[in-house]
């Protein structure tokens, strides 16, 4: 799960124009989110060893999995999905509505054409 996330981040940073010129917060959250679950797994195993023996999902010991799972699903994956839908909308406009290809540039040039681009 974590390996697939890191691979998708590296692919996006090196191959996709929307992600190659800037860092996407939803994409970073989608990759880093599973890493935040690992400390919760440690807490869960410690809790089963010393505090709460039963595997009841309603136990407070398991609330971190639910919280992190929902945050990752709707926060990170939802943000990445919104970026994908936005990009697909621009591509559809260019293909079907003959819109100018300038809308495909994720970071259009500044108003002043002589201005230097950069950081």
Image (spheres, rainbow, N blue to C red):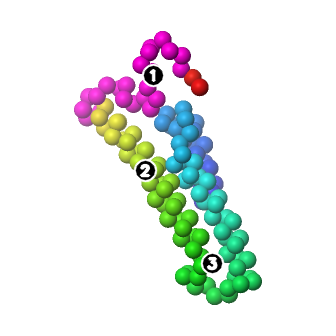
As measured in the structure, the alpha-carbon distance from the residue carrying label 2 to the one carrying label 3 is 31 Å
SS of the residue under disc 2? helix
Specify which label sits upstream in the sequence, 2 or 3.
Answer: 3
Please identify the quadrant where the C terminus is shown: top right
Q: Is residue 8 visible?
A: no
Is residue 111 magenta-colored? Answer: yes
Q: Residue at x 70, y 79 (%)?
A: 47
- Near mark 2 (Cα within 10 A), the count class, few <14, some 14-19 or many ≥20, is some
Q: How packed is label 1: few (under 14 Cα within 10 Å), some, or many (20 or more)?
A: few
| x, y percent for residue 45 | 70, 76
In-front residue for pair 92/116: 116
Q: Quadrant of residue 66?
A: bottom right
Relative to 114, 2 lies left or right: right
Q: Position of residue 56 (x, y in %)?
A: 58, 85
Real-space Cα distance between discs 2 and 1?
Answer: 25 Å
The residue that disc 1 covers is 109
Q: What kind of element bears circle 1?
A: loop
Residue carrying label 2: 81
Q: Earlier in the sequence, mark 3 or mark 1?
A: 3
Earlier in the chain: of badge 2 and badge 1, it is: 2
Residue 46: x, y in percent?
73, 77
Report the front residue among 74 and 96: 74
- x and y percent of residue 84 in the render? 42, 45
Q: Nearer the viewer, mark 2 or mark 1?
A: 1
Name the residue carrying label 3: 61
The local crowd at label 3, few if under 14, some if 14 to 19, many if 20 or more residues have their Cα within 10 Å, is many
In the figure, is residue 21 to the left or right of 53?
Answer: left
Magenta stretch, residue numbers: 95-117
Q: Inspect the magenta stretch and tell me whether residue 63 lies in it.
A: no
């Amino acid at each position: 799960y974590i390996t697939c996330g890191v691979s998708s981040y590296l692919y996006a940073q090196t191959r996709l124009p929307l992600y190659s010129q800037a860092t996407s917060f939803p994409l970073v959250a989608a990759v880093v989110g599973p890493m935040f679950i690992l400390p919760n797994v440690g807490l869960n195993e410690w809790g089963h060893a010393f505090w709460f023996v039963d595997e009841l999902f309603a136990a407070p010991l398991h609330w971190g999995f639910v919280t992190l799972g929902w945050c990752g699903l709707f926060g990170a994956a939802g943000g990445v999905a919104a970026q994908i839908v936005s990009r697909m909308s621009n591509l559809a406009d260019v293909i079907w509505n003959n819109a100018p290809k300038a809308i495909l540039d994720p970071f259009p040039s500044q108003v002043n054409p002589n201005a230097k681009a950069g950081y």
